[in-house]
Each structure stands twice: as structure tokens, then as C-alpha cells.
Amino acid sequence: MKQLLRLTALLLCAVVLLSAVSCVRDRDESIPEGMKLATAAGSDYRLYIPTAWNTNTSYGVSGGYYNLDVLSTVSVAKYEITEEMQEKIDRGEPDNFEGGRLDWFWVNYCLTAIEEMSLSGSVAEFTTAPDLIHQLNARRFTTSSIVSGTTLCFMQIVTEREGAFYVFSYTADKEIYEALLAEVEKMLDNFVFAEPYYPDSYIKDLSKDTSAPEGMKLASNDDVAYRFYVPTEWTVNRDESVFAAYLESDRSSVSVVPYSPEANSMSVAEYFTMTEEALKKLAGDGYEALGEPEKTELGGRQATVYYYTLTVGQTQYKYMQVIAAYKSMLYSMTYTALPENFDAHLSDVEEMIDAFEFR
């Protein structure tokens, strides 16, 4: 389970870039006693978790976990109301639900995601009830299912604000779900909406480099065993631990992720098979491989290129993942875009691949 969560977090971090916003950096925070901030940069709310919990905002998602060995996580996600959603709302689809738009959104977007990652037929009948979050009307949903052989319990609070749905999620192994509920309720009591948050300093610094190819800039530092260059018009994301860059125009992104195999050795093909299995567990039929793998080079090393699509919620993304082995690690450069924007930036991505260097 831990490996599955890590893989999917790494691969889905690019999706966050597609929906991120830009803002000025934030002022000092007033943090409730006994709690700490667990809010990802750019989020227009504040999520606080108890100090005994572990913050996890590395991939642009607000959240944290209590125990890494036994699943116990909280997170907050924002879903902008798309044109497709609005068309369904205008047709009156939410009118068929007891809780109106909030129930309609959860059943069609959140419950569907739970079903896709769960053992077929294992999702329990859900409960729904009115709730409040930061004085806004909300709905509380609970259910459970079997995921990778483990019974998980889910609690999600959904509200709507300024053209978007917000989902607070608590997911835990059945063994510890009830024991942590009081602390989760405290997180909900202290949750507030606010101006977009940006910390006073960046998570990572970039190295100064004068040898970047013409028209490109460095998007990495000396903490990693590679040099990642991107075209100058791309924006480097410095608010997450993964080195990544994106285009302001349509949020297409490219990220570089290292992976240290737990086994003594792992081939590129074995790594992608593991990745593919994780994505299938996450998205079910929402994952689709495209064509056959292709050979290329990355930083002078033989590499393999994989293409696929992944549907997250009800939005489809197209991926190009280039994987190479270097020393004892595997390195993955992943290009993510909406399908209609994918081809438009392929030349830029090829430049990034050609300029990439191992150190």
C-alpha cells in the first residue's frame, strides 16, 4: 500500500500544476495551539493538522498523515466547476439528489474515484448528512471499501464556494479509523478559507548555471544527480519537492522524479510495469496505454518512452514518460498535458530531453 501511494503521488503531481494559480507570497500565519500548517502553496484555504501528525504537501496537495505504515491520511482538494459540469448542472442533474449540487458532485466525482481504486463490489453503501465547514453549508459522506487487500474507511466533507467544489478527505485503515476521528474533527473545526497561501521562502533553491543551452534555463540544483533545463518561457515550480516546470498559458508541465528501487536491481521495464499497475489500481478503466514503448536517450543513457492517458475525476490527461537508469536509481521525466494541448509543446519537451544531463 505504501509503495502504491508513493508511486501515484509522484505521477499525479503534474496534474496539480495544471490547475495551480499564481499569487504573491504569504504573510506569517496564526496557527492554532497544538497544530501546524499543512497547506500547499497556492491554496485558497488553510488546513491545520495536530503536531503529532506528519505534513505531506510535497506534491502540491494540502494534507498529512498520522502513520506511514498504517494508512491514515487527510487532504483537501479543490475542483473548479468546468464547462462540462456547468452544462450538467444547468440541465438539472443535481435536482435528483437529496443534497442537491453537493450530493450530485460527490456521487459523480468522488464516489466514482473510490470505486475505481477499490475491489469490484467491495464499496459499502454510503451515508450522507448535512454539515458545516468554515460556516459554509456542506455535506458529509462516509463509506468503506477494500483496496489492495486492505479495508479502508472514507469520510469526505464537500462544500461549494466561488465557482469550485472543495473536498476534505479523511482515509484510514479500518483498524485506526475511529481512534483518529476526534483529531480529524479538530482539523475541520480549524479549517478556514483565505487568500491563496504562499510560504515566505521556496521549498527548494535553484543552482546558478551559466552553461544552459541557448534559450533555456536550469530548473534543478546540486542536490540531485542531474541537470534539468527548460525553455526560458516555462515557469519553474519551486514550491514542491519535485523539480518541475509548466507553461502559464495552459498549465502543461514537465517533471523529473528519481526512484530508488527497494530490490537490489530493477529494469526500466519492471519499473514501468509497477507504475502501470499502480495507475490501474488508482484509475481502473481511466488508465489507457497508447502505442508501443519507444527507445531514446536521456542524459546519454538508454531510455524508454511510454505514452498513456489517465482520467482523474472526469478530466483526461495525456502523459509522455521517459525513463532511464543511472547508477542505482531510476529517473523519470514526465510530460503532462490536456490531450488538446499535448502536441503543441512536444518540440519543447524534445529540447528538454536533449539538454538533460546526468552529473
Image (tube, rainbow, N blue to C red):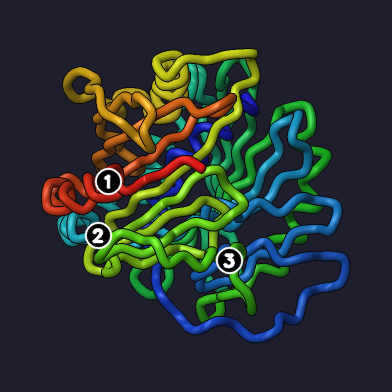
Name the residue that disc number 1 marks: 315
Residue 25, percent from left and from top: 55, 82
Mark 1 crowdedness (10 Å alpha carbons): few <14, some 14-19, many ≥20: few
Q: Please report the residue visible at 27 percent of the width from the left and 36 percent of the height from the top.
A: 320
The one nearer the camera, 243 or 218, is: 218
Q: Which mark is residue 22?
A: none
Q: Secondary structure at mark 3?
A: loop
Mark before the other along the chain sequence, 1 or 3 = 3
Mark before the other along the chain sequence, 2 or 1 = 2
Q: Please report the residue visible at 26 percent of the width from the left and 64 percent of the height from the top.
A: 214
Q: Secondary structure at mark 1?
A: strand
Name the residue that disc number 2 marks: 82
Amino acid, disc 1: Thr
Amino acid, disc 2: Thr
Residue 268, percent from left and from top: 42, 19
Mark 3 crowdedness (10 Å alpha carbons): few <14, some 14-19, many ≥20: some
Pointers 1 and 3 in contact (C-beta within 8 Å): no
Q: Quadrant of the N terminus?
A: top right
Name the residue that disc number 3 marks: 205
Q: In the rendered image of this protein, does residue 149 appear above or below residue 74?
A: above
Q: Secondary structure at mark 2?
A: loop
